[in-house]
Image: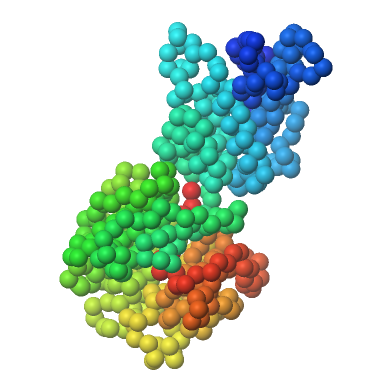
Amino acid sequence: MFKISEELAMQEGERISKELPKPDSEQMYNSFGVIDNNKCLLEGGEDLATGEQVSKELLKQEVEWMYNSIGVTDNKRPLEDREDSAARKTAKPLEINGKEETVKGLHDLSLVQTEQPVDQNHGDHHSESNLLIYQLGRDMSINCLAHCSRSDYGAIAALNKAFRSVVRSGELYRLRRLMGIAEHWVYFSCNLLEWEAFDPIRHKWMHLPRMTSNECFMCSDKESLAVGTELLVFGKEIISHVIYRYSILTNTWSSGMSMNQGRCLFGSASLGEIAILAGGCDSCGNILSSAELYDSLTGTWVTIPSMRKARKMCSAVFMDGKFYVVGGIGTETPNMLTCGEFYDLKTRSWTVIPNMCPPRNRQAAITTSAGSGAPPLIAVVKNELYAADYAQQELKKYDKRTNVWTTIGRLPERADSMNGWGLAFKACGDMLIVIGGPRNFGGGMIELNVWVPGEGPPVWNLLAAKPSASFVYNCAVMGC
């Protein structure tokens, strides 16, 4: 972070104070905006000169407070909690109280900057689109905003056009990714056209705008995928496959996207701003081996080499920078495929891995057909692959060196499902998260249980719960 001395902050405060409009008989200005003369901060009949001095002191204090509250420090003040340089690079966004104070400070400073006279000789240099936090400059302003929680970006965007532009353009999220800052939110649907988001940092539930679609799409099987700053929902309208896209930049749904080959029941996973979809079946029911890569920055689909085996109802993850597809139903047998395969983005080639699919419980395999059970419930945390065995209520871990699955513990006790359907098993940053809950005739609960791998056997902690009349239909985790 940049270091700003107290002397520079004082000089900046005096300069800003001189540029502020002078008080008149009806109103006076202070560092927080326009204040009615009857409510001014002067007390005891102080004269105007004294009032100006008080205003300067308040402005100086505010500038110093703002610099410190958003993490910019002077030469004498160490970073909060004395974090070292290495820790700062991987630090999480500001804590809740600090974030709220930062947003308030941004609002206060935005009021100050709107009173700054525009230098006609500099044109766009002092235009509103370039100001942001006037006292810090545009680059440092964006750097500071990148450390705010994205829960606050809606309020920040409402400050003025400059803030709204930098939030909606996606510039902040691209900078956050370069800085290694990401907040992982869980998006899931328990109703046909309704989606919710959950912020595990603030434990905050949010409703997304309702999707607008026809009844055919509403009742069709759907897949979901989070990539970049988008949530994609795949479904079918009569005979054509369609994609609905939700953008966190605008908080709106849109449609009209299409893949090179329409498909459903495919495996998919994302890595930053890209995602890969593989397998599935077309509108005629043919099982596919083809695959496509989606770039969310450009909104384009690119066909990549096909898998070695055609498969539908498979699962996919990114691990060690490679795209893995596991399980599914092939064309040669109605049974579940036991092999997996991975795609190397550098060599643009697929490699088959025999017996990579998590083993199914023998009794479950006898009583349920391959098509009636859910695709393998797998997730990757810190480049380690885990699987949820819904039949045995066990958590398994994959050993990449030996190609063997090992049971390491139990799933949450109340993680109910119907042959795996209605249960979500996802990676959420450094956590594994299981989303599901008990059902009864009067309704049920949706519970979010988490465990951080790496510290002994799994001990699941209840992160949040809420009443729900339905299972989890679709679920995706967006990290940005």
Residue displayed at 38% across by 74% down: 375
Task: Decide if residue 52 is on the left or right side of residue 304.
Answer: right
Position in image of residue 256 (x %, y %): 25, 51
Q: Nearer the viewer, residue 313 or 15?
A: 15
Q: How is the image coloured?
A: rainbow
Q: Quadrant of the N terminus?
A: top right
Q: Is residue 147 visible?
A: yes
Residue displayed at 58% across by 34% down: 144
Position in image of residue 245 (x %, y %): 34, 52
Q: Nearer the viewer, residue 56 or 87?
A: 56
Task: Decide if residue 139 is on the left or right side of residue 83.
Answer: left
Picture quadrant of residue 222: bottom left
Q: Is residue 9 visible?
A: no
Residue displayed at 67% across by 14% down: 14
Task: Decide if residue 461 is on the left or right side of residue 116.
Answer: right
Picture quadrant of residue 264: bottom left
Q: Is residue 285 above or below residue 363?
A: above
Residue displayed at 54% across by 46% down: 151
Q: Nearer the viewer, residue 35 or 354?
A: 35
Q: Nearer the viewer, residue 451 or 250?
A: 250
Picture quadrant of residue 34: top right
Position in image of residue 27 (x %, y %): 63, 16
